[in-house]
Structure formats: structure tokens, C-alpha cells
Image (cartoon, grey):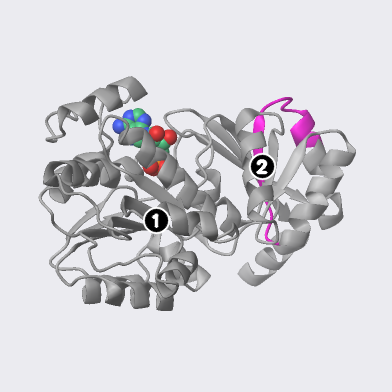
Amino acid sequence: MTFEKLGLIRPLLNTLAAQGYETPTPIQVQTIPTILEGRDVIGLAQTGTGKTAAFALPLLQRLDEAKLRTQYRDVRVLILSPTRELAAQIDKAVKVYAKKLSLWSTCVVGGVPVRKQINALKSGVDILVATPGRLEDLVSQKAIRLNKIETIVLDEADQMLDIGFMPAIKRILKLLPKQRQTLLFSATMPKEIRALSNDYLKNPIEVSVVPTTATADRIDQSVVHMKHADKTSAIAKLVKAHPGKRIIVFTRTKRGADKVTRKLNAEGLGADAIHGNKSQGQRQRALEAFRKGTSPVLIATDIAARGIDVPGVELVVNYELPHVPESYVHRIGRTARAGASGLAVSFVPKTSLRTCAASKS
Ligand code: AMP
């Protein structure tokens, strides 16, 4: 399959060629023609599958072909994302894909001053990427109108549910025109998300690319049993064994993340933490330093790390195992991206092994 056969226009094809995208990924094959037709879509897919391009490319094409001028404070395509980092990442990707088109996109998230965002929205935008809280804030300040929206994308819908955004999403959906296109992407399909799609999507096409509990075969996964007290020195040892490589350590708590970060920095191992108690500026700086490799170890909690797409992550460490399998799949999926291979190591307490053995007998 080629991007050309999927019906994409020449400027987009040129951009994709310049980006080195040779063949469309499965989610792109399944959704691009459907979105071009204007139909609603439910996409069961995680980040890392090429999902952003799967919705952004056809939406850019539809906007370009409509040749409409966006009016004062209007938005034509709204993309909602659960976290600021994912929103920024989507916005960046949209800007890359839109390079050869005359379309305007911007991103509004919480944690940064609102004034600049209000100004950026004044003359209207073709594509707005937003987190739900800040979007509602801007709507209530009349900085933006949602009644001209042609398409809404709900990205990582299950994560929005987990964070508690479902009431906000429903309020936002009620402000949109009835005649619109709705695209919903989610790594899993809990019943609340299924209900949301039944209530707000019209005759959607449903596509699924990866079973949510499958991990990439290219990830070498292992567990190490140890006492809790030994974990910080074990992390330091692991990091030293992979000098200069990009490593993400997942901790369950923000305090845990700070503790590990302090330990690694005390040993001169260049670590930064990213979690909900950090300011947006701190989170962005940590991510940038990680991307550039100046601070090669990132200590993260699940929420903050959601959707992070940094190429070349060699190792993912689970300082504690997460509570649900989907989080495990998601965490270790930060490595082995775009065809590369990777390592995942999980620290498991010795006590839980005994408990497990006892409950079996
Ligand atoms: P996403 O699932 O949208 O986060 O995309 C994951 C990564 O795959 C991003 O770095 C994209 O730039 C890249 N990507 C998306 N589609 C393709 C493609 N068809 N060929 C090569 N890379 C791609």
C-alpha cells in the first residue's frame, strides 16, 4: 500500500516523502480513506502506531480542499488530548504535516499564561489542539467559539476517562454543531468510552490495530526480584550499565520519582523527573533535555509520560509494576519504537512472590 493509493494530495505526499515515511502503517491504511469521506471513526490504537498521522493527514486534506477562510475566534478542527505533553506533540506533528499547505494550527494547554493563547485564537484557527480544562476556560472567557467545528478528535479517550475528564468532554461535545465528524481514538475500550461513542458518534467505522495487551516482540522483557530498600541502588547500577543511553524509569508515585531522581543525580547520572507536581516549564525542559540526550534518564509517573514519543529509548524500567496490564504495555512501548528493539526491566518485590506462591498452594 502507498500513501498515494490512499488518496492523499500531492503536497502531503511530498511532505511525507521528505519525512522519510515510505509506507502507511496499518491504522493509516484503515482510517485515512474513511476520514477523507467524512465518516466517524472509532480507532482502537495506541501511540506509536502512527495514529496522529492517521487522523491529521486526511483532516488537513479536507480543510485544504474546502478552501474556507477561518473567521474571527472560530475553529474548524478540534483535537482534544489528555495531557499537555501529548497535546504539544500532536501540535508539532500537525505543523510538520501541514508544512506545504496554508493552514493555521495552534495548541492551548493549562499551566501556561492564558493571554498569549487568547491572542493566538483571535483571528481563528484551522486546527486547535487542546487539553479539556484549558479549552473550557477559553470558551467561558469567549476567547473561542466552537459552533463552526467540522471535526472533533478525541485522542487517548481512555486516558481522558482515567484522569476524570469525561464530564468536561461531554460538556464540550454539547457545544459542537450536530452536523460534524467525530473521531475517537483509544488504546482500550472501557464501557464508559463505548457508551460515549454510542451517544456521540454517527454510524462509525471501527478499526483496531493492536490487541491492547500485546507488547512488541522486539522488546526484551525481564523481571528482577529485590527488596524495596535495594531499588535505588539497583537503578543506579542499571543506568551505569547503559552509559549515555536514553532510559525511562516509571514510578508509581511523584515522591518515588523525586527520590530516584535525587539518587541518580547524587551519583552524577543526569536524571530529570516529570510528573504532575512539576510546572509545565519544568516538564517541557525535562523532556527536551531527554530528547537531546543532555539528561539521558527520565523518571516519570504514568500520567506525565502518556504518549511521549522520543526515538532511541533503549531501556524502560518499572520501579514498581503498574496496577493494570494496559499501563505495562504502554510504559514499555516507550522503547522499541519505529522498528527498533529495546529492553524492559521490572522490579518486583520478593515478598509478593511469596504471597503469590502461598495463594497458589
Ligand atoms: P504516533 O503513533 O502518531 O505517536 O506515531 C509514532 C511515530 O511514528 C512518530 O514518530 C511518527 O513520526 C512516526 N510515523 C507515523 N507514521 C509513519 C509512517 N507511515 N512511516 C514512518 N514513520 C511513521
Numbered range of the magenta stretch? 237-253
Q: Position of residue 164 (x, y in %)?
A: 49, 74
The vertical placement of 189 against 240, above or below, is below
Q: Amino acid at mark 2?
A: Arg
Residue in the foreground of this view, choosing between 62 and 205: 62
**Considering the numbered disc 2 on the image, is that residue within a helix, a strand or a loop?**
helix
Q: Which quarter of the rendering shows the N terminus?
A: top left
Q: Mark 1: which amino acid?
A: Leu
Q: Is residue 248 magenta?
A: yes
What mark, if any, has residue 285 been given in the picture?
2
The quadrant where residue 303 appears = bottom right
Residue at 69% x, 69% y is 358
Q: Is residue 22 visible?
A: no
How would you rate the neighbour count of disc 2 (Cα within 10 Å): few for under 14, some for 14-19, many for 20 or more?
some
The residue wearing badge 1 is 121
Question: Residue sitting at 81 percent across and 38 percent down?
Answer: 236
Point out the tag, 1 or 2, that comes first from the N-terminus. 1
The structure residue drawn at horizontal position 62% and vertical position 45%, both measured from the top left corner, is 284
Q: Is residue 141 left or right of residue 359?
A: left
Q: Is residue 209 visible?
A: yes
Q: Position of residue 311 (x, y in %)?
A: 52, 31
Q: Is mark 2 within 8 Å of ligand 1?
A: no
Residue 130's place in the image compared with 4, above or below, is below
Query: Where residue 145 appears, x then y in whole percent?
Result: 32, 67
